Image (cartoon, grey):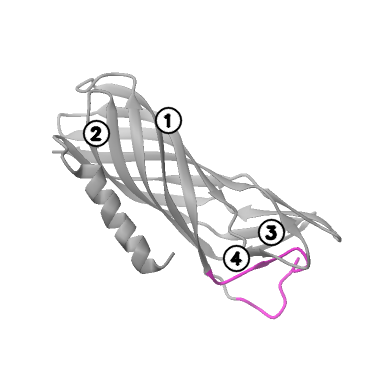
Amino acid sequence: MTIRMLKISVVALLVIGVAGAEEYEIGALGGSGFMRSVGVAGARGSASTGLEPGFSAGAIVGNDMYSRLSGEVRYLFRDSNLRLRSGDNKVSFGGVSHVIHYDLLYSFAPKRSRVRPFVAGGAGVRVFRGTGRETAFQPLIEYAALTHTREVKPVVSLGAGLRIDLSPRVRFRVEFRDYLSPFPKQVIAPVGGTRISGWIHDVMPLAGISYIF
C-alpha cells in the first residue's frame, strides 16, 4: 500500500465516521503500549522479538449514531522501538508506528447517560517503521535483522472502557485496547532460515478528553 492510498483511506474513513451524524465528538488521547514477545526459532537456538514498551498519543473523530451504537475514526502514534533478545543478550533499534482505523462502539447505557461503559471493535491499517541506524554488524543477526524500512499491515482493534460526560460538551474516557496485526517481517526480518510466528498483540491503556458538538 502506498502513502497516497493510505491518505485516501483516511479521508474515506473520516467521511464514513461522521457523515449523517447528529452529534459529533472530537478529542485527543494518550497512554502506553505493551507488546507480548513473539518467538524466533532457528537452527542455532531461539530468541524473542517485538516492540518495546512506549508512549502512545492520538486523536478521535466520532458520532453517536443510535442510542447505544457509536462510530469512531481513530489515529494513534506509537513509540515502537524494535527489540531482539536471546538469553542475556539484547539489541534495540529505533522505531515508530501509526495506526488508523474505524471502530464501532456498543454502550451498555443509553445516550445522555453520564457514565457509559462500552466495548469496541474495528479494523484499519498499521504502518511500522524502523528509524534506527543500520550498521555492518548487528548483535543477534543470526536470528533477525532490525531494519530501517517501512511496512503496512492490516490491524484489528478490540477494546473496552468507560466514557464519562463531565459536562454537556466535555467527555472523559479511559479504555484498554488490543491492536492485533500480522508480524511485520520486513521491518524485523528473519535471517538464515529462522522462523518468526505469531501476531502482534499490542495492549494499550489509554485515557482521553473530547469535545461534543
Q: Which residue is tagged 3?
A: 84
Residue carrying label 4:
186
> Alpha-carbon neighbours of circle 4 within 10 Å: few (<14), some, or many (≥20)?
some
Relative to 163, 153 lies left or right: right
Rounded to the nearest angstrom, the CA distance separating label 2 from label 4 is: 40 Å
Q: Position of residue 212 (x, y in %)?
A: 17, 37
Nearest the eye: 75 or 1: 1
Image: magenta residue range: 134-149
Left or right: residue 187 versus residue 56 is right
The image quadrant that residue 164 belongs to is: top left
**The magenta stretch spans residue 140:** yes
- Evaluate if marks 3 and 1 touch, with contact meaning CB atoms under 8 Å apart: no
- Image location of residue 120, percent across then percent down: 39, 33
Where disc 2 sits, the SS reads strand
Q: Which residue is identified by label 1? A: 160
Q: CA distance from mark 4 to mark 3?
A: 14 Å
Q: Earlier in the sequence, mark 1 or mark 2?
A: 1
Closer to the chain start, of discs 2 and 4, is: 2
Mark 1 touching mark 2, by CB under 8 A?
Answer: no
Which of marks 3 and 4 precedes in the sequence? 3
Instruction: Name the secondary structure under disc 4.
Output: loop
> Which residue: 13% across, 38% down?
213
**Residue 104, x across and y down, in percent:** 34, 35
The kind of residue on which mark 4 rests is: Gln
Q: Which mark is residue 171?
A: 2
Q: Is residue 68 above or below residue 88?
A: above
Q: Amino acid at mark 3?
A: Leu
From the viewer's perspective, is the residue at label 3 or at label 1 nearer?
1
Q: What's the amino acid at mark 1?
A: Ala
Residue 183, percent from left and from top:
60, 54
The residue that appears at 44% across and 64% down in the rendered structure is 1
Whichever of labels 4 and 1 marks the residue nearer the N terminus, that label is 1
